[in-house]
Image (cartoon, rainbow, N blue to C red):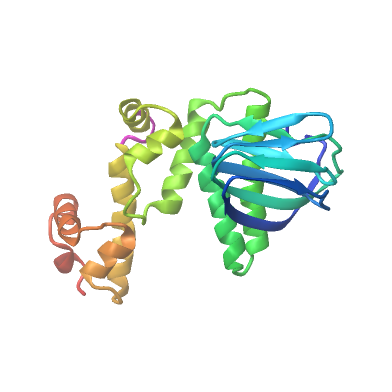
Amino acid sequence: MFPNKKTQYYRIISALELEWEPKREYAVARSFDALSFRIKGNAVFEGKNENTSVGGGEVAFVPKGYDYTLDEKSHAHLFVVHFESLPERSVGIEALRVANPLWYEEHFRRLHRIWQRKEAGYRLAATSVFYRILEELEREALEEKPCVADRLSSVVEYIHANYTDPTLSVSRLSEMYGASQTYFRRIFKETYSALPLQYINNLRLKRAEELLRSGYYTVSQAASESGFSDVKYFSRFVKKIKGDAPSKLWKE
């Protein structure tokens, strides 16, 4: 299964988010490799000597120079990265049902967002995410389950990147971790001495404090920018933790 340990170089050419209805079409051999994560939809890649089925929650690799017919069975939604690799590979299409689809969806989505924005350093940033995806694929290809610490570390990394999103939930995080919410809360607290929501709110509080101290934000704006969807809840939270209202602790 992709990736190949002998590969020493990857260069991203494009990152796309695609959707299409059921169809059947022939794909001419391309001059680049492709790695995709399928959010939904079932399809069959019909090659010269074998067929490969792929469905939602699976990663698929299509090598450079490979002719195939795509038989899309249902509405499809996927992310795909086109890239060059050295040394080149000559294997056929491969598919892998990953253990944690949500993790892959978030990372493919993040790579796509970075690539589309094309901000300074975007190639390096996108390549960094791509290598992280390849690292996780290699673990799964070798049938090595990440240890508890590694899995939890990935979730915490995601929290730090997304804590200002007010929709971030323990339910979503426990899905990423691959366990029930009860177990996830317990293992999280054992490791970080705080429940997941407490950990998230503490990050949000630090961010809000920075914004209010800057003098450019009102309490309402700081709460919103930090991930608190309700300014009243934010004020109560601050008073509980700090002992006073935010407007008194950090003058607007």
Q: Main secondary structure of the magenta part?
A: helix
Going by the image, does 242 lie left or right of 44? left
**Is 193 contained in the magenta span?**
yes
Task: Give the number of marks.
Answer: 0
Q: Nearer the viewer, residue 189 or 39?
A: 39
Identify the residue at horizontal 51%, vertical 33% (top origin). 100
Q: How far across and down, in percent of the image, does residue 78 sit?
A: 58, 47
Q: How far across and down, in percent of the image, does residue 182 sit?
A: 30, 27
Identify the residue at horizontal 62%, vertical 23% (top origin). 144
Residue 187: which quarter of the image? top left
The part of the chain drawn in magenta is 190-194
Asked if residue 209 shows in the view, the reply is: no
Q: Nearer the viewer, residue 86 or 74?
A: 74
Going by the image, does 204 lie left or right of 92? left
Q: How far across and down, in percent of the image, does residue 126 sit?
A: 63, 56
**Is 36 contained in the magenta span?**
no
Q: How far across and down, in percent of the image, does residue 190 sit?
A: 35, 28
Going by the image, does 212 lie left or right of 93? left
Q: Is residue 101 above or below residue 125?
A: above
The quarter of the image holding the N terminus is: top right
Residue 174: which quarter of the image? top left
The quarter of the image holding the C terminus is: bottom left
Going by the image, does 96 lie left or right of 90? left
Q: Nearer the viewer, residue 30 or 182?
A: 30
Q: Nearer the viewer, residue 229 or 222?
A: 229
Asked if residue 212 shows in the view, the reply is: yes
Identify the residue at horizontal 28%, vertical 66% (top origin). 222
Residue farthest to the bottom, as pictured: 216
